[in-house]
Image (cartoon, rainbow, N blue to C red):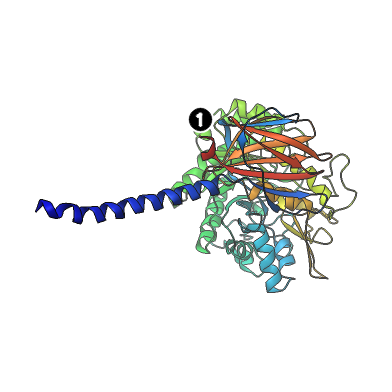
Amino acid sequence: MKKHFLPVVLPAICVILSALIILSCIAQCRRAIDSEVVVFSSSADGDRLKRTKGNPFITDRDLPLPVITVDTAVRFQKIDGFGASFNEAGMICLNSLSRESKDSVLRMLFDKESGAGFSLMKSPIGACDFASAGPWYTYNEVSGDTAMNHFSIERDLRPDGLVTFIKEAMKYGEFQIESPMDFAPDWMYFGLKDGEKHIRPEYYSALAKYYSKYIQAYAGNGVTINYLNLFNEPDHPHYSNVTYQEIGHIIKDYVVPRFKADGISTRIQLGETCVRGEALEKFPAILSDPEIRNHIHAVTVHGYDWKDFAKLTEFHNKFPDIPVWMTEICYATMCCIPENGPAKVPVYEFSDGEFWGNMIMNDLKNYVSGWIYWNMILDQNGGPWLVSPEHGDPDNNPQHSVVIINRAAGKVTYTGLYYYLAHFSRFIRPGAYRINSSGGIDKLNFAAFRNTDGTIVLNVINNSDEIKCKIKWYNKMTTQKFKAHSITTIIWNQEDGL
């Protein structure tokens, strides 16, 4: 028997060795792919998410160049995503296009391979200033119907409705949705004059049921609402006058018990403040109550201060375990134009994107985990908008959007905002962490991130003339030229530094 052993075993060993060699070659090929440096750029000279091959990392050496150092060992906040808002106005604009053009716009917004890959969206509860497919509405206009027997989302199911819009977008990407509310049904308030826009306490239970019905109705139509924000810009004369202290009471004693009874897992947020600084001013008193704090999964702010980014770091230092989202910002000629901002909206020039790119970057560097612009799509007039003065929605309210659709000509414009935002939303995916990056020079605004798949993403905004930099990572380096007035995304794989 022994004399037959080698002839039998040797072929098997050869097969095994061959397989191991093949697997090794595959691994080496895979590592070669991983080691590539990929660069995407959008710039004043015409680049639009242009992909090029970057210089490979080599052994570090001294060069007479500015240095950006990336350190994956130091990480900061987890990223939840980037995106914009669903409104009827946007769907009206989309429906003015051919089916082919409509699909192209949705792909450019939601496809993570060829488009912006939006992953975090806002969808208002009932009417807002761009609920433009009809008059002001809520889901229950029957006064005193505390049992919500007449609750209906019928309008949201129409061709221009929010559910229709969301389901169209779902064909091209995956995203989470946060939903705030400008106003509950009018009959729940003391009145609609300034100072009277407060929910009557006897309707708190009905309000909790209203939120529950909304979430269940959307789920029944194939749309998951991941986060609920009870009121948009509360404790403010423009919308509901409900104080944050009272919101905490409604959450703890009415919404949470209602959700538990109805088996709803939607997470609750606190905020939608007008400006960043309100997070420091108004949230700590509510969050100091552990019974409320345990139910808050994130706080949300709007950016209409235009500049107080450091306030968010101050808030983070007080509450490091609570994610902070920036959930609304836009140009609005009626009220919201920053210093040296545009005289007219919408803004077609690519150069405007630099302003928005720096805002996104500065928010992220101050611990923002999610970033949501206001209107995703509007028309050539910055509309259409809803007029309902008693609900804080005036006429002549043109605003700027991520995408502009000329409804008369059928022309689609992807704004500078679109491209700068896409450099974040497409390449920094949910679950990524911001990691440490330092150095550079004043004209460069940058931040680095590590995705869950191990890829490292360095986003660099060049606010001035063309410049070349050295990028240092562990004991390796590469060089990169940043075009004048551009945003550049550099991607490589974590494994190569190990």
Q: Residue at x 65, y 65 (%)?
A: 161
Residue 236 visible, this orientation: no
Q: Amino acid at mark 1?
A: Pro
Task: Label 1, secondary structure: give it.
Answer: helix
Answer above or below: position of 298 versus 372: above
Answer above or below: position of 272 versus 411: above
Q: Residue at x 51, y 57 (%)?
A: 216
- Which quadrant of the view contains residue 307? top right
Query: Going by the image, does 15 lie left or right of 127?
Result: left
x, y percent for residue 295: 51, 38
Query: Going by the image, does 185 lie left or right of 292?
Result: right
Residue nearest the viewer, comparing 388 with 349: 349
Q: Quadrant of the N terminus?
A: bottom left
Residue nearest the viewer, comparing 262 with 72: 72
Q: Residue furthest left?
A: 1
- Which quadrant of the view contains residue 494? top right
Q: Residue furthest front?
A: 3
Residue 159 visible, this orientation: yes
